[in-house]
Amino acid sequence: MKVGIADTTFARYDMAKAAIRELKTGDSVQIARYTVPGVKDLPVAAKKLIEEEECDIVMALGMPGAAEKDKMCAHEASLGLITAQLMTNTHIIEVFVHEDEAADETTLAWLAEQRTVEHARNVLDLLYRPERLTQRAGTGRRQGFEDAGPIESSKSGKAH
Amino acid sequence: MKVGIADTTFARYDMAKAAIRELKTGDSVQIARYTVPGVKDLPVAAKKLIEEEECDIVMALGMPGAAEKDKMCAHEASLGLITAQLMTNTHIIEVFVHEDEAADETTLAWLAEQRTVEHARNVLDLLYRPERLTQRAGTGRRQGFEDAGPIESSKSGKAH
Amino acid sequence: MKVGIADTTFARYDMAKAAIRELKTGDSVQIARYTVPGVKDLPVAAKKLIEEEECDIVMALGMPGAAEKDKMCAHEASLGLITAQLMTNTHIIEVFVHEDEAADETTLAWLAEQRTVEHARNVLDLLYRPERLTQRAGTGRRQGFEDAGPIESSKSGKAH
Amino acid sequence: MKVGIADTTFARYDMAKAAIRELKTGDSVQIARYTVPGVKDLPVAAKKLIEEEECDIVMALGMPGAAEKDKMCAHEASLGLITAQLMTNTHIIEVFVHEDEAADETTLAWLAEQRTVEHARNVLDLLYRPERLTQRAGTGRRQGFEDAGPIESSKSGKAH
Amino acid sequence: MKVGIADTTFARYDMAKAAIRELKTGDSVQIARYTVPGVKDLPVAAKKLIEEEECDIVMALGMPGAAEKDKMCAHEASLGLITAQLMTNTHIIEVFVHEDEAADETTLAWLAEQRTVEHARNVLDLLYRPERLTQRAGTGRRQGFEDAGPIESSKSGKAH
């Protein structure tokens, strides 16, 4: 299996390094990396990784800024990533860390590392062990910060 | 007939379980389930269920968070689900429960269960009894919370 | 000629009934009706009416709710309807009545009836008498509420 | 060369008349006109003018209202017009005049006339004299209101 | 290699001139230039440069105004540029300078010049030296204003 890694020079943390380290743990995946300037360049990079480099799945890594304009860029990039997936019938796992998700730079770097690593595990599960994702369906998983966890209806609560 | 169920590990309630239980009541449908990390992964999952698993219809189940960023994710996912339908001429029934639709977790779980079950009935009607939907056209149906019900113009009121 | 009518169980007024009544006045059109749960299901329904039922034009009838989430649904549906038209080179006349367009339910029902009827006339003109639309070009027509009417520049005012 | 004119009955000024008058000044262009109810009907009308009427370029003329809902309609129409261009590799020059761009109806009519005329000149340049557009590149041209004009960096200022 | 330059008469600075000057420094690229009225005309211009002029990459240069309506135009153009890239598997580097990014016209002109030049270097790297982009991945590069620079997690900080 071959995993494409599309990342940016705009990001302030080397998310690709984190992704590649995790992807190489325990499964023999090939990696193709493609760096572009910003998140709006990721959709076509991801599509080229799929169609020209024959990747089976792609991770699209980015760190949008905190300004309103940056959020719009991220939105446009996300729409493009979804369209690219529909055009190729191939998953592109978006891993975006927004600069205003953390109060300081150290936490932001930690979040970029952690979210990337956890999504790399999702990528491996999608490729090799999709049943593991189904086992965790509806359990409130989050990538990076703490999981939200599952909720129960009173009905199901009473039923057990 | 074969129904695809695309769901997420992000959701905090096992909506797929509710959907499958309802779909298996009284009609002999086959089920194909596909779990992905979050709602933005649903469009390609749904398209793959249609094109690679030959599903006749898909339910896309998700529980977007309450933050502004989560609402944007849901919007992007919805647009992707509509595009996937247009590319395949196949219905993908979106069942999204937003975390801020209920005041507490118990109600939220109840809503996730109820909306999924009612949409599973819509799926069965679309597949086997489309005339039932036409009988209920314009009657203010809601999935989950109480129906809004029909309204009447004074003209039609007088006409009867 | 064959007109497709796509409508919803979510709507609180039977707009399709109004459309069909008007379409059958004076022109011999065939009707194909397709009811779906909500407005986001309309784009694929309209596309199927065009491609599978060979409709020459489609009316997409819906009544989005007043909440912010409902407005987003309507926006997503509208984008899908435009894409469906571009994929088929066929008109899909969107007739949406927003629940907050009227102060009370009687007016809302009247508006749903009136806007649908006036758009049904537009459909007939597009099919049989496109020159009538050109005669009314730039005259501030509205469907439902009163027409806004044309405006004149002082230059044209002076010219006459 | 053949120019398509797509316009609406919703608009309150006959922009097509202004466009056609200007297009017929000095160049021998053929005109095909197609009137639809509102701006959301323009994308498919423009695409049909290109693909069924063999137009080399299209002008899409509209006057969106001032309400929030009208702005959303204009946004949806604009996205559709861009998609239609990408599907046909053909320019569709959007000429939209928003009802809140002018303080009174006379100015609004003047603006609708003026912007249409200036964009008709752009259309002729795109068809016959593209080098004229390049000569004006980066000079702050506006259609309708006064040009914003070019700006200079201090560096270039000093360089000359 | 051939680089397409799509620019506008709306912009208030001749960004294309800056791009061409930089592109001709040190690499033997061919240039094809295509000027259109505004940013919403850029997507089809860029696609035509790729498909009709056989450009290997395109720069889309624009200067959206400061008003809300201008920001919406830029958003629509950006989405179209992303779609055009996905339809052609070719990069279109968007270089937009928003009129409200600078406090005065001199700074705005400087920013338009600087951002264009830095993105022209990105274009050359994408064409000839993609490994240079990967070397700068995750280092917080900005085009125009000062780079944001990389951040470090405390973990990596301790690791070294």
Image (cartoon, coloured by chain):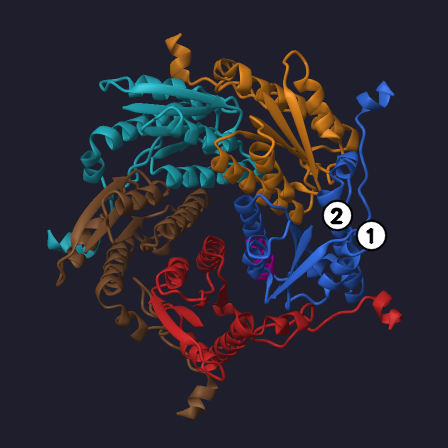
Chain colours: A orange, B cyan, C brown, D red, E blue
Q: Mark 2 points at which residue?
A: E124
Magenta residues (range): E68-77
**Pointers 2 and 1 in contact (C-beta within 8 Å):** yes
Q: Dot 1: few (<14), some (14–19), or many (≥20) neighbours within 10 Å? A: few
Give coordinates of residue C142: x percent, y percent. Answer: 33, 66
Count the marks: how many? 2
Q: Which of B80 and E7 is in front in this view?
A: E7
Q: Specify the amino acid type for callout 2.
A: Leu
Same chain letter for marks 2 and 1: yes
Q: Is residue D130 above or below residue C46?
A: below
State the SS at label 1: loop
Q: Where on the picture, by quarter, is residue B148?
A: top left
Residue under the point 16% across and 52% down: C30
Q: Name the residue under label 1.
A: E26
Give the side of residue E142 with respect to residue C43, left or right. right
Q: In this view, does E32 lie above or below A16?
A: below
Q: Nearer the viewer, residue E32 or C87?
A: E32
State the SS at label 2: helix
Give the side of residue E147 with respect to residue C23, left or right. right
Residue under the point 25% across and 30% down: B127
> What number is the disc on residue B31?
none
Q: Say if the magenta span includes residue E74.
A: yes
Q: Nearer the viewer, residue D28 or A127?
A: D28
- Specify the subunit that label 1 lies on: E
Q: Specify the amino acid type for callout 1.
A: Gly
